[in-house]
Image: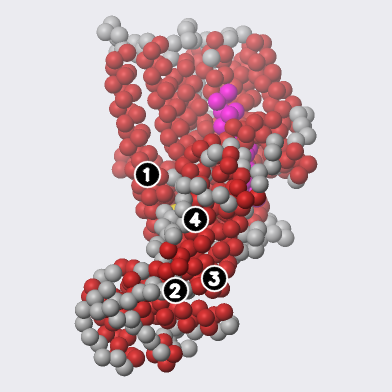
Amino acid sequence: MVTPEGLALPVTVASRGSRVGALVIDFIIVIMGIFLVQLLFSLLFWAVLDEDFDPASGAISAAGEFVIILAILLIFVARYGYFLAFELSPRGATPGKRAVGIRVAARGGGRLTPEAVIARNLIRDIELFMPFIFLLLAPSGEQGNAGIAGLIWFGIFMAFPFFNKDALRAGDVIAGTWVVEAPRTKLAEALSTQGAAAAEGTSDLTGVRYDFGEEELSVYGERELQTLERILRENQPEALSAVHAAICRKIGWDPGAGDERAFLEAFYAQLRAKLEADMRFGKRKADKFS
Amino acid sequence: MKAPALGSWFARKEIEPPADIASATLRSDRFRLEREGDWRRLEAIVARMEKGGLKRVDDEDLLALPTLYRTAASSLSVARETSLDAATLRYLESLVQRAWFQVYGPRKGFFAWLREFLFGGWSRAVREIWLDVCIALFVMVTGTIVGWLLVAEDSEWFYRLVPTGLADSRRPGASREALADTLGVEDGSGGLSTFAAMLFSNNAGVCILAFALGFAFGIPSLMLLVHNTAMLGAFLWLFADAGLGIEMAAWLSVHGTTELFGILLAGAAGLHIGRSMAFPGSRTILAAAAASGRRAAVVMVGVVVMMIVAAFLEAFPRQLVGSTEGRFAIGGIFLAFWLSYFYLYRPRTLAESEA
């Protein structure tokens, strides 16, 4: 995806697994909602029925009728409105999608229009609800082979996302949309202001300032730097000492113990300073092999 | 209105940048710490917009949004070339992406969209799929005739075409009185509104199915149309055979002109998608499918509206108005209304002159 400023933004297509997860969450919400509405309305219905209600004639009071109409309309709204309303919102995601961190976007980076959201959700009806109803009816035997037909139908549409690289389902094809990762990362602390990496920084324990020479810093590249960054941020003692030992072996230092973090902080800051300085001269070192 | 000074756009009020810039050893981290305040402010604005739209964002923030977005975007492109801080790059990418969705996201609210839809968008979309409407109309007329002829040939066909639940007392060999009775007027309006709600829910479901099946190159949509209209033909034959043809047509026309029109449009919308996927022309199949899918979706929202109207017509006037002339009048008025709305009503809108 390229923004109008000419900046390429990487868009990661959401994994099929997370989409299934989102769907399951949404399904549970919708079904629970419908169930609660049914329950509420049947209670209401019995409350408004008169005591002189005659089951033989089947005639019901106006209030009872009103309750039934409301129930029918609410279930219709739940079936079609739930996905529509949430995907039209600024976040472009249903609660299920939000929970797994994905959203709907227009393919190719255009604007997500209401028409597109409507189209992709109308198709959901044949992908999901129709075969689902067939499957529910199948055991009664009333529909004959419809249950098997429903299963095949269901299978075809469920397999659809596996046959194209963007994991598009049928509704996405029709609407010109796709489902992408919507990461919400927090800005982590700057590592070079902490501890032994800082400008005046020395080891808290020994008060020594680690200094590495050009030779010793040139063994690693950007990949190793990012691994080191991850290790420092996760801050697991075992991982720290393992990496500490590995680096010491590599640069021919004698690995001590107890001051691993300060050592790694200093190494990280100086390695990054060197690699970034090289970058400014157009030299990039992808990993230790290059 | 006084133009705000450029400096005030960058004013940081709540979010102060970290004070220890001096302690950062790296040039790229100093770059980051200098701009961090702007990024965080943008993040806060975007988070508020994601929660509740524009209403929650005050004017000052809204004015600052484009500038902050561009600041973040340029920070990202600078950082890509100068910084090896993976966490910061990841953060900036996600921030710029989120902000991009808000800055270039849908600017139309739902109600603005609805107004555009009712006053122009709907009838324009219907006109745009005229060829598919013609094909679907042809199929529906053919289906009705076929249904009629099949049942006229052999009345056994009636049971094959019409599901038993629908037929009840309406079957071949029923007396004229029994048939006339089913066309009669209910004695009160009790139960009719429930009936209307159920009809709507059911009919809208059928229409959405007709549309959605268009995905398979439109063929299932056409089959659905043929099947439903063959049923209609069988019923027409049944009543015409008993000498009730005119009465039946009147009874049907009250809601039928709206409902059948809706089904026609739904089938046409499905066919439109299927046709553009089978014959995408110079575009890719995906692009063709997306363009026609959006157009068909507009038609479909209209079809759901028509189904609501049809359900009301079916439940109330059809059962309460008894005379044949009265029924024809209601049906005719609605048919005239739909035709003139779709084909005569052509407002010039902003969207049209853009397109």
The x and y percentages for residue B345 are: 76, 29
Discs 1 and 4 lie in a common subunit = no
Residue B206 on image: x %, y %: 52, 36
Q: Say which amino acid is labelled 2.
A: Thr
Give the residue pinned by disc 3: B80
Gap between marks 1 and 2 measured at Cα: 51 Å
Query: From this viewpoint, is residue A274 visible?
Result: yes
- Circle nearer the viewer, 4 or 2: 2
Closer to the camera: disc 1 or disc 2? 2
The reply to whether label 3 and label 1 mark residues of one chain is: no
Segment colored magenta: B291-310
Magenta stretch contains residue B303: yes
Mark closest to the chain's N terminus, 3 or 2: 2
- The residue that label 2 is drawn on is B25
Q: Which residue is mark 4?
A: B37
| Amino acid on which the number 4 mark rests in the picture | Gly
The part of the image, by quadrant, that contains residue B305 is top right
The image shows residue B329, relative to residue A142, as above or below, that is above
Q: Are marks 1 and 2 in contact (CB under 8 Å)?
A: no
For residue A27, which numbered disc appears in the image? Answer: 1
Pointer 4 indicates a residue of which chain? B
* Mark 4 vs mark 2, CA separation in Å: 19 Å
Q: Quadrant location of the N terminus of chain B?
A: top right
Secondary structure category for the residue under label 1:
helix
Q: Residue at x 58, y 39 (%)?
A: B59
Residue B232 horizontal side relative to residue A271, left or right: right
